[in-house]
Every structure is written in structure tokens, then in C-alpha cells.
Image: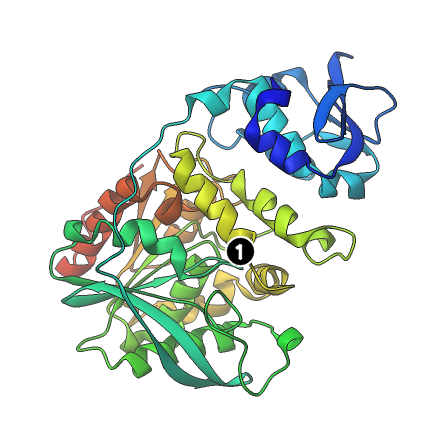
Amino acid sequence: MLNTDHEFLALAEGVDTTFALTSRDGTGIVMRVAGGGVDAGDDPVFNVELDHADWLEAASQSPTPGTQHVLAHLAPRGTGTVLGDTTVFAQHVQLVRRAVEMLSNRAAATRERASGSLAAVTGRYVRIDVDPWGACDVFVETVGSGRPVLLLHTAGADGRQYHGLFTLAELFPGRQLIAFDLPWHGRSNPSYESDNLDYSLTSESYTACVAAVISALDLPEPPVIVGASMAGAAVIEMAARHPSSIAGVVSCQAGPRVANRHNAWQRSPLVNQTLFVPEWTCGLMSPHSPKIDRDRVWWGYSQGGFGVYERDIRYYTDCWDIDNVREMLENEAPPIVLMSGAYDYSVPSAATRELAAQIPSAIYRPMPELGHFPHAENPPVFAQHLAWALAAIDAAAVPGTED
């Protein structure tokens, strides 16, 4: 089966290693990947060992949300472990992921969708100046017209994550959808006053950048700002630090703080960043989201600048904490909608509900069909949730909390 799968063979090109997938009851398989193909092997370099029940979840056609990927079951989050050379595992985690997908036949069951046209999207650059970066030319894309909605991409990615949503602009009449690439990301180069490898991100520089982009765009009114994951934290910080510059917040996949997302492999000279980073992130999506969209998220993460994802994750893990801005959100904060995809095992829905309970102006809405990248992994489904959130903010009324 693996020897006829185009994706596995493409990932296996140039590889020469042997690994095992085993259960703690002693059952399992050993695979030798070499010469662009796979055969039975022995003496594995690394062994991914899970409980039998965890393998059943990871390989299930309909896994319990949050159990859909091997990485979800490894310590410290789960009880699974990697025996042997863990660096070689990090170098080949893409093979483990695809092998499990194929052996479970999940790959054949994924849904596809036709992609829409981006012909109506326009792009341009705006100049901003942000301490400590200095002058930056930031790439901005827009579609539609009317009340502005500013869309922030996730760590290490860029505004192309919103292309799927852009093709559904007709679902947002009277709205202008706007996405931009942070400096050092996508089509925004490093600043003119910093070296390529000088990039870092803090609460202050992140929110100052967003505020500077809003100012440079000269919008007719303050925008609603939307973000997921790292950007889901940043939009809440915007509500605390720059409340007068925005009309409301839609934050997805954010908790009071985050753990277990940073590791040395994200910037290691021994691990290919363009393979490891997309694999570290792709399992967070719902296995029921269309493969064409999940593959585009994977592809976007394979294109990040060296070290940028790791620096973004440092902001997310070291700087973001609701305790840092809680008091700023108690009085004049704009409306805040918190939404959570059920399949995200990095920020479980319980963490988003906990965050919502700590922000007086926040309401919570679950997204049971989605995962960590709701805006990109299934744009038509996310569009329905986003339309609900925008309507709630427009009404400046909280209709209640859903469970």
C-alpha cells in the first residue's frame, strides 16, 4: 500500500532509515524505507510506542477529537513515547504520519472541495515603523468592500491562510476582508533596519505592528480583528492594549496561556525545518476537513523563513498570559468572541472556555467540526461561525454562551 502511495513515496525520496510502530502489548510493524520505497525491516533506529487503544484512535476513520494524530499521544501530553534516536524521529515524523494515514485507510476517506477564484483579491504594500524593528514594508490583501475585518495569520505562516475565506467573500456582504503578512513572514520582508536573523516577537512589538497596519490602511472605521492560535492571543492583547483602534475581536484557539508547543527541533540544524514545522502543526487539524485545504496549510508552513516559526512560538509560550492583561480588559474592552475547534489538542476547548470565563466582555462558541486552523482547514464551515461572531459584535449584545 505505501509503495503505491504518491505522497508517501515523495516524502520518502532520499530517505534511508528503519523505524517501528508498536503497541505496548508487543504487536507492531517495522519498516525499512530506502531507495524511494518501503519494505519490512528489523533493528529500527526509532520506535513509536503507544497503547493499543491510542493506536486505534490515531488510525480511526472517526477519531475522538484531540486523538487524531500520533503526536497527540506522545508525552508530555499523552502516555506514548519514542524509543531510540528521537532526533531521527523528528527528521522522519512525516513518514510516521503518512504511514498511519495509509494503514488506517483514512487518506482514501478524506473529502475534497473545489477551490474558488482569487481574481477579485487585490494586494499592495504599506510602510510601517515598529519598535524595535524599524521601517517595514508589509504586504496586504483585500477583497470586498464595507466594514473592515482584519485577519491575522498564525505563527510562522502568512496571509495566504485566508485565501479560502477570500473566495467566499459573498458570504460577508458589506464587509471588506483584509489580511496581511507580518514582517519576516510570507511576502513581507525583514525590516530595513534589522538583520534577517534578528527577528523576535513580543506582546509589545506584535500589538504595535497590528496597530501600525491599521493606521497605515486609513480605514473608514475601526476593524473587527480575527486571529487563531498565536494570533488568537494577539487579538485579545489588542483589545487590552489598543482598544480604541478596533471594533471587536474574534479569537480562535486561544487559552489563558499555552504549553508544550516549543521544542528545540523547530530551529535545530539537524532537522529540516521545512518538513518538521508543517508536520508539527498539521495533526492539529480535523481529519474531516478537506484534504486540499489541510495540504495548503501544510504547504504554507513548509515555506517559512528560517527560525521564524520558532520565534513566533516563543512569543506564544513566553509572552502570552491572560494574567498580563486581565485588568486592562475589565472596563472598556470591545466585544470579544472566543471560538474553539474541537480537534485542536494544543489548545483544547476546555482551555478556551476557561479563558472566556476570565474576560468580562467575552462569549464562547464551539466549533465541533474544526481544529487548530479553522479559518484555513475548512473555510466554508469557518465562514458560518465567523458570520455569527461578526453579527454578535455588530449587535454589541451578548446572546449567551453555548456549550
Query: Total label count?
Result: 1
Asked where in the image residue 293 lies, by quadrant, the reply is top left
Q: Crowdedness of circle 1 by 10 Å Cα count: few (<14), some, many (20+)? A: some
Residue 89's spot in the image, x, y percent?
75, 38
x then y, percent, for residue 279: 59, 42
Across and down, in percent, residue 122 comes to 26, 67
Question: Nearest the camera: 250 or 213?
Answer: 213
Left or right of 303, for residue 368? left
User: Is 369 on the left or on the right of 312, as rendered?
Assistant: left
- Image quarter where the N terminus lies is top right
> Residue 325 appears in which quarter of the rendering?
bottom left
Inspect the image, locate mark 1, and give the three-letter code of the amino acid beneath it: Arg
Name the foreground residue: 248 vs 275: 275
Is residue 375 visible in the rendered image? The answer is: yes
Q: Residue furthest right?
A: 43
Q: Quadrant of the C terminus?
A: top left
**What residue is drawn where x is 59% and y is 18%?**
103
Q: Is residue 319 above or below residue 78?
A: below
Identify the residue at image location x=47%, y=52%: 255
Reading the image, the residue beneath label 1 is 257
Q: Residue at x 79, y 40 (%)?
A: 88
**81 is higher (above) or lower (below) than 244:** above
